[in-house]
Image (cartoon, rainbow, N blue to C red):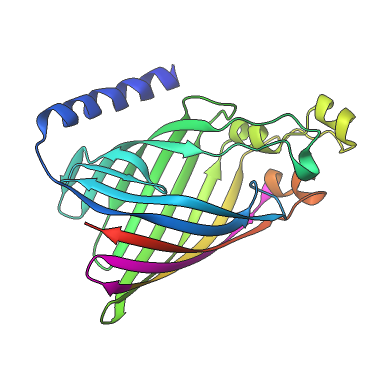
Amino acid sequence: MCRSLVYCSLAAPFLLATSAMAQTLNGSIGASVIQAPDYLGSDDDEARVLPDLNLRYGDQLYLNLRDGLGWNLYRQRNWTLSPFLGYQPGRDNTGDLSRFDEVDDSLTGGLRLSYQPAPWNLSLQAETPLSGDVDGYKLTLRAGWRGQPAPNWSAGIGPSLVYSSKAWTQSLFRVSARDAARSGFSRYEPTDGYWRLGLSGNLNYRFAARWSVTGLAGITQLTGDARDSPIVKNAGDATQSLAGMVLSYHF
């Protein structure tokens, strides 16, 4: 029932938006090199080369890797309400977890409320999986500050707080009887959701009219039933870090 309501709330706005608007596409495209854990809770870092998109269609539609594909359904002064489609990574059965069942990636649907009194940006979003092996829901609260310390330079920093429901936590941190028998890990069944605390920042340099380079870094701390899972305690780390560089072309 929950997924059906999310599908309906997302489908109608996007159909209306694409048929009614005649606005311009702008933003940036580029490539990034990211060093990050190979799955949530891992202590093995992996370097990835990924495309980077930050696109806007007028003031209504947006697409980027952090916020997904969204539509600004309601805009009033500093407030914005947006239904969106997002992405939740799963987990490959490689490395320390090669004898575990694989967790397939999920497409998610959700709703985001943003408040942007410059130079601050505050947002609260709720999302639930629409496909894949992850179930439940996730709530994300973010705060960010952005400023220009020098000409052609900009910087941003902000904390985040994420709550994953019991079902979501079980999807990623459970050790089933089958997983335990094959891997030697203790069987584990999360009994509650968990909180994830984060802090991230970035520094951007606009070295040409249409080109920029951005350095970014972040750290996340797993707590509760996620931190106590053998997936994290025996084969991973509750502290997750990320660093990378992004080269962007603006238009």
Q: Which residues are magenta?
A: 206-224
In percent of the image, x 54 and y 45: which residue is there?
163
Name which quarter of the figure residue 23 lies in.
top left
Q: In the image, is residue 216 part of the stretch drawn in magenta? A: yes
Report whether residue 49 is seen. yes
Report whether residue 229 is seen. no
**Outermost bottom residue:** 150
Indicate the position of residue 240 as horizontal and vertical percent values: 63, 58
Towards the viewer: 50 or 169: 50
Name which quarter of the figure residue 30 lies in.
bottom left
Relative to 210, is 161 on the left or the right? right
In percent of the image, x 13 and y 45: which residue is there?
24
- Residue 8 drawn above or below residue 139: above
Indicate the position of residue 177 as horizontal and vertical percent values: 83, 26
Relative to 147, is 235 on the left or the right? right
Q: Locate the N terminus by quadrant.
A: top left
In percent of the image, x 38 and y 47: which residue is there?
124
Indicate the position of residue 31 as horizontal and vertical percent values: 42, 56
In percent of the image, x 70 and y 34: which residue is there?
191
Towards the viewer: 90 or 220: 90
Q: In the image, is residue 11 part of the stretch drawn in magenta? A: no
Q: Locate the C terminus by quadrant.
A: bottom left
How many circles with numbers are drawn on the protein? 0
Dominant secondary structure, magenta: strand
- Residue 233 drawn above or below residue 112: below
Towards the viewer: 216 or 143: 216
- Residue 45 drawn above or below residue 39: below
